[in-house]
Image (cartoon, rainbow, N blue to C red):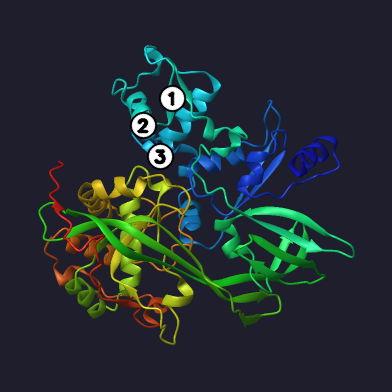
C-alpha cells in the first residue's frame, strides 16, 4: 500500500523526487521519470543500464547522472567510461538441473495448470529429466496429469519464493502515545547491518533511534528523534567451515577443495556517529546461521613468501577469492568473506584471527546449490582465475581480474601480486620470489597480520570422506 501511494504521489506531481533502494525501485512503477541519480556503481553493468533507463521512457527527454564513490570499482569506471556504454553485459545463466530452484517452479506451474507428462513442451534439453525428478521427489502428484501437492498451496501461492530469497523479515515499529505502529519490514540479511541498538534508522526521511532489537521475535522497537547525525555500524562477519561433506582433488596438485557445512557469524560491536565524529561501542547479540559452502586451504609456504614481501595475506586471500568468483559463471548467487579495511589496517593487533583459506557459501535462506557447483568446478575455475590475473595489464587490479562489484568492503583490502601468488601455490605452480614485488602502499603497510594457518575441518562421520579425483578438462 505504501508503494502504491508513492506511485500515485509521483504521477500526480505531489512528489518531485524519490530516493529508493534497488528493492523499492523494482516494486514501484517509476518509468516516467525525467532524471536518475545513481550514488555508487550498482554492482553490475546490467543494473547500471536498467537504472539509467528508468528515465526518458516513452521517447521523453532524460538525464542520467552517475555519482561515483571513492571505491576502486567506481574509480575503474571513471577511468574507463566507455565501458559503461560499449561493454557487453554478462550472459544470464540458469542452472536447469538445480533441484532446489526446480522444485519451486514446478510446483507453481502445476498449481496453475496440471502438467501432462506426455506433452513435449515440458521436455528440456535432457528429455524428461525435470519431470521425472519432480515425480521421484514427490513434489507433484500424478492423476494422470501432475498437480502440485496441496501442502504447498493450502493458504496462498506466495508461500513459495521463486527467487530462493530468505522469507524472514524483521518488523520495525515505534511506540507513540497510545499505540505501536508498524513502520516497515526488513529482510533479515539487511537488518543485521541496518538496525542495532542506538543506531539511527531513516524511514522516509525521518530519523528514528533503535531502542530494542529481538531476533527471536523478529521485532525492532524504534523511537522517533530529532537528530542531526547518522550512524554506520562497526561489525564483524566471519564465515567458518564447520564440517566436511565432500573432498575433491585439485587437478595435478596435492591440494584439495572441500564442500560442507559453514557458519555465518555476524555481530555489530560499535557504531560511527557521523557529524558528531563519535565512535561508540555497542553490545549486541551475534547473528549466527548455518548454510553450505566450499573452501580451499592456502599452503603455508606462500603465506611466508607474502609476509617476506610485506604483502598482507588477508589482502591476497581476499583478491584470490574475487578472482575465483570473477571466473565463475554463477558468481551472483554465491558469497565470500570479504576483508574489512578497519580490521586489516588497524594499528593495534586484532584478536579475531582468520584461517588461511578461500571460502564461498550459499547465502543464508537461498538454498541455491551454487556452492556445490563451485566445488565441482574448482580446478577449472582456479585455472581461469590464474590466467585472468596473470594476463591482465592493469597495475593494481580491476574488474577483469581481482575487483568485485559486489564486495561488501569496497575492494579496499586487495593485492594483485598476492592473489597471483596464492593461485599459483594452490595450483602447484612454481613461484619465482623475485617476480613478486614488495608492497609499497603506505596504508597496507600499517596494521598487523590477521591470518593464521588452517586446521583440519572434521567430517560428518567418524569415517574418512573419500577424495574424488577431478577428471574434468
Depth check: give the residue in front, 164 or 394. 164
Residue occupying image coordinates x 60% and y 41%: 51
SS under mark 2 = loop
Judging by the rendered image, the residue that carries numbered circle 1 is 141
Rendered-image quadrant of the N terminus: top right
Where does the image place residue 11, in percent across and percent down from the top left?
Answer: 80, 35
Which mark is first along the chain, 2 or 1? Answer: 2
Judging by the rendered image, the residue that carries numbered circle 3 is 100
Residue occupying image coordinates x 70% and y 35%: 29
Q: Alpha-carbon neighbours of circle 1 within 10 Å: few (<14), some, or many (≥20)? A: some
Q: Alpha-carbon neighbours of circle 2 within 10 Å: few (<14), some, or many (≥20)? A: few
Tally of marks:
3
Question: Do the CB atoms of the residues marked 1 and 3 lie less than 8 Å apart?
Answer: no
Where does the image place residue 76, in percent across and percent down from the top left?
Answer: 45, 55
Q: Is residue 211 above or below residue 362?
A: below
Where does the image place residue 40, in percent across and percent down from the top left?
Answer: 57, 54
SS under mark 1 = strand
Which mark is first along the chain, 3 or 1? Answer: 3
Q: Relative to residue 168, is residue 389 drawn left or right?
A: left
Question: Do the CB atoms of the residues marked 3 and 2 lie less than 8 Å apart?
Answer: no
Judging by the rendered image, the residue that carries numbered circle 2 is 96
Q: How far is the residue under mark 1 from the one under mark 3? A: 18 Å
Where does the image place residue 202, in percent across and percent down from the top left?
Answer: 72, 61
Amino acid at each position: 500500500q505504501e508503494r502504491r501511494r508513492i506511485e500515485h504521489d509521483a504521477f500526480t506531481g505531489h512528489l518531485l523526487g524519490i530516493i529508493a533502494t534497488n528493492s523499492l525501485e523494482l516494486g514501484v512503477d517509476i518509468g516516467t521519470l525525467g532524471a536518475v541519480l545513481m550514488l555508487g556503481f550498482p554492482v553490475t553493468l546490467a543494473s547500471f543500464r536498467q537504472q539509467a533507463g528508468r528515465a526518458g521512457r516513452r521517447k521523453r527527454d532524460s538525464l542520467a547522472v552517475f555519482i561515483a564513490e571513492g571505491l576502486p570499482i567506481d574509480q575503474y569506471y571513471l577511468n574507463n567510461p566507455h565501458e559503461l556504454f560499449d561493454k557487453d553485459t554478462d550472459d544470464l545463466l540458469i542452472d536447469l538441473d538445480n533441484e532446489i530452484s526446480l522444485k519451486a517452479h514446478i510446483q507453481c506451474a502445476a498449481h496453475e495448470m496440471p502438467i501432462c507428462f506426455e506433452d513435449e513442451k515440458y521436455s528440456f534439453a535432457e528429455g524428461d529429466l525435470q519431470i521425472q525428478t519432480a515425480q521421484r521427489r514427490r513434489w507433484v502428484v500424478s492423476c494422470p496429469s501432475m498437480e502440485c501437492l496441496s501442502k504447498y498451496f493450502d493458504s496462498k501461492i506466495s508461500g513459495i519464493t521463486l527467487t530462493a530469497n530468505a522469507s524472514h523479515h524483521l518488523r520495525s515499529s515505534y511506540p507513540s502515545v497510545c499505540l505501536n505502529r508498524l513502520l516497515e519490514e526488513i529482510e533479515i540479511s539487511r537488518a543485521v547491518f541496518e538496525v542495532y541498538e542506538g543506531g539511527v534508522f531513516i524511514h522516509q526521511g525521518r530519523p528514528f533511534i533503535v531502542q530494542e532489537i529481538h531476533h527471536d521475535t523478529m521485532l525492532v522497537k524504534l523511537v522517533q528523534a530529532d537528530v542531526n547525525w547518522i550512524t554506520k555500524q562497526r561489525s564483524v562477519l566471519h564465515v567458518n567451515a564447520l564440517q566436511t561433506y565432500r573432498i575433491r582433488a585439485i587437478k595435478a596438485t596435492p591440494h584439495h577443495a572441500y564442500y560442507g557445512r559453514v557458519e555465518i557469524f555476524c555481530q555489530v560491536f560499535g557504531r560511527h556517529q557521523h557529524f558528531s565524529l563519535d565512535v561508540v561501542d555497542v553490545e549486541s547479540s551475534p547473528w549466527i546461521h548455518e548454510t553450505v559452502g566450499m573452501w580451499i586451504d592456502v599452503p603455508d609456504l606462500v603465506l611466508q613468501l607474502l609476509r617476506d614481501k610485506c604483502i598482507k595475506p588477508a589482502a591476497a586471500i581476499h583478491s584470490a577469492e574475487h578472482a575465483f568468483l570473477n571466473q565463475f559463471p554463477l558468481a551472483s548467487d554465491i558469497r565470500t568473506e570479504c576483508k574489512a579495511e578497519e580490521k586489516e589496517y588497524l594499528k593495534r593487533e586484532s584478536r579475531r584471527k582468520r584461517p588461511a583459506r578461500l571460502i564461498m557459501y550459499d547465502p543464508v535462506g537461498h538454498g541455491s546449490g551454487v556452492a556445490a557447483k563451485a566445488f565441482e568446478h574448482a580446478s577449472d575455475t582456479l585455472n581461469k582465475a590464474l590466467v585472468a590475473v596473470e594476463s591482465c595489464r592493469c597495475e593494481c587490479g580491476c574488474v577483469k581480474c581481482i575487483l568485485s562489484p559486489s564486495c561488501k568492503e569496497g575492494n579496499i583490502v586487495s593485492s594483485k601480486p598476492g592473489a597471483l601468488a596464492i593461485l599459483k601455490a594452490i595450483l602447484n605452480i612454481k613461484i619465482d620470489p623475485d617476480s613478486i614485488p614488495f608492497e609499497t602502499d603506505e596504508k597496507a603497510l600499517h596494521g598487523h597480520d590477521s591470518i593464521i594457518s588452517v586446521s583440519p575441518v572434521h567430517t560428518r562421520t567418524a569415517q574418512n570422506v573419500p577424495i574424488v579425483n577431478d577428471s574434468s578438462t
